[in-house]
Image: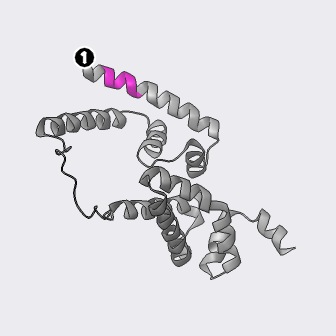
Amino acid sequence: MALLAMATEDDAALIQRTGLGDRDAFEELYRRFARPVLGMAIRQLGDSGRAEDATQETFTAIWRSARSYRPERGTASAWLYAVARHAIIDRARQRVEPAAEAPDEPSRDLGPDEHAELSWLAWRVHSALQRLPERERAVLELAYWSGLSQSEIASYLDVPLGTVKTRTRAGLARLAGLLEEVRR
């Protein structure tokens, strides 16, 4: 009977029970979210070992901070993905150990002219993004800066998947038009 009740329990209740030290609730959260969090970490970090570490850090943070979750401030999945995003960013900031000896190759670092061009391009894109409607901008930022899939975005924003697809398509089309204006 307890398994049936847990299968129908919503994520918010599981987080709240985890905050009270309920290991069964925590295990159910892990079962539901470990794969999507690991997928998000692999996409952002590009290394399965570092992604597994970020996933472990995510669930460690969830166990420690589940008491801070407030359902009135947003959906449970949005809170959980925000915790994951922070753990992934922290893992990305950590240095990757360099090879024992650096190979004798010319530097692949960008020169000043290439840095200037990239800065100009980034500024153009950022300026164009600021001109998009909030709904379209939010979807594009979650997809391209946070690396979330459309399904993860739908869960994060608590909207249907079709809505995310429509907003993405409309936002990209509007963004292309805005960037074309700047190019002229």
Q: Residue at x 57, y 34 (%)?
A: 165
Q: Residue at x 67, y 80 (%)?
A: 22
- Asked if residue 65 can be seen in this view, the reply is yes
Q: What residue type is labelled 1?
A: Arg
Q: Percent x, y for residue 163?
A: 60, 36
Q: Is residue 117 left or right of residue 147?
A: left
Residue 176 painted magenta: yes
Q: Which residue lies furthest to the top in this view?
A: 184
Vertically, is 31 above or below 166? below
Q: Would you identify the image quadrant in which residue 87 lies?
A: bottom left
Residue 91 painted magenta: no
Vertically, is 19 above or below 153? below
Residue holding disc 1 = 184
Q: Percent x, y for residue 81?
A: 53, 58
Q: Is residue 134 left or right of residue 151?
A: left
Q: In this view, does 111 lie to the left or right of 102?
A: left
Q: Is residue 52 left or right of residue 22?
A: left
Q: Would you identify the image quadrant in which residue 140 lies?
A: top left
**Residue nearer the viewer, 41 or 165:** 41
Provide the secondary structure element on which disc 1 rests.
loop
| Image quadrant in which the C terminus is located | top left
Q: Which residue is drawn at 44% across and 62% down?
A: 50
